[in-house]
Image (cartoon, rainbow, N blue to C red):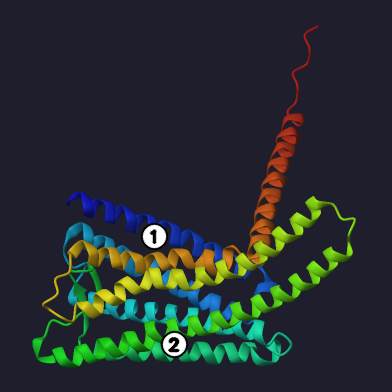
Amino acid sequence: MDAAEVLLSALVVAIIAVSLLSNVVVLICLLYSAEIRRQAPALFTLNLTFCNLLLTVSNMPLTLVGLVSRAQPGGDGFCRLAGFLETFLSTNSMLSMAALSIDRWVAVVFPLRYHSKMRHRDAALVLGYTWAHSASFSAVAASLSWVGYHRLYASCTLANARASSRTQFVVFTVSFHSLTFLLSFVVLCVTYLKVLKVARFHCKRIDVITMQTLVLLVDIHPSVRQRCLEEQRRRRQRATRKISTFIGTFMLCFAPYVITRIVELFPAVPINPHWGIVSKCLTYSKAACDPFVYSLLRHQYKKTCGDILNRLLKRSSLNAAGGRQDNDHRGSSIPRCPAAE
């Protein structure tokens, strides 16, 4: 292995560790908090977490093995199964992000009718579409033997080794990425830009009310006035930063890989083998980013993590206190030797 492959292997190990830990924490929060589970977006978050966890424990280690050994991990049948799973999980993850963006759009644009428009039944129907969409493309690729080991990505993924079906594979690849990545990206942009527009409108109304109040309060201290103006600016920046994070992480993690897969369809364009693995690592890094982008940085999840941690600390302190009391009881029950007369 050269230095670049060693660094890429270390990167994959780091992504596996962060993704596994963060997604497990999100899953524990979902199981612990009934308040989070009562909300319809919990189904989308649970589905996204499930896909990320399964991708972390199945396909990421196989990519690491393929990168280290420079060979296909396992037999052909095993690699085809892993390729089917990788195609299904990556597609399901993209569509789950699009579903989360639709949920937030409904919550912001229709706040008074949100609970009637986005119930658990509606969320289940959306998830049913994501599963059907993901399973259909994965099944077609597997049935036509278009999944297997790809040396450029050191992974079991979409691959076509037969020249006779090249045209069909090109059509399938373009259609697959158009109806998954491009569709999800368009949904993310439309919904989140709508959300940002509404958020800025509300911020502008709050700013007008605040400025009117500041004008009326002629005796207000300049420092207080300055803090109010700074809070207005932070409020506007916070909404823009969140939307940029949602769309930016999606593009940064998935776009290089999708573009590489499209460029790969033209044999005349050379692709650096290290770049193929880097683009694959970027898609894997989305599984490590999602828990922070969609869950762990939100107030409910922070509060739930704090409650779990406090409960564990309290239980450990009670166990330690109980152990000390047991030792004291056992020490007091030991008969003492009579004093020598």
Q: Is residue 50 left or right of residue 316?
A: left
Q: Residue at x 58, y 63 (%)?
A: 296
Disc 2 crowd rating (10 Å Cα; few below 14, some 14-19, many 20+) is some
Q: Secondary structure at mark 2?
A: helix
Which residue ends up furthest to the top in the rendered image? Answer: 341
Three-letter amino acid code of the residue under disc 2: Trp
Give 234 or 267, whichever is nearer the viewer.
234
Disc 1: CA contacts within 10 A as few (<14), some (14-19) or many (>=20): many
Q: Is residue 81 visible?
A: yes
Residue 307: x and y in percent read: 69, 58
Which element carries disc 1, helix, strand or loop? helix
Compare marks 1 and 2 and give the one earlier in the sequence: 1
Asked whether the beta carbons under mark 1 and mark 2 sit within 8 Å of each other, the answer is: no
On residue 50, the disc is none
Q: Quadrant of residue 115?
A: bottom right
Residue named by callout 1: 16
Where does label 2 land, which residue? 131
Residue 173 percent across, percent down from the top left: 26, 86
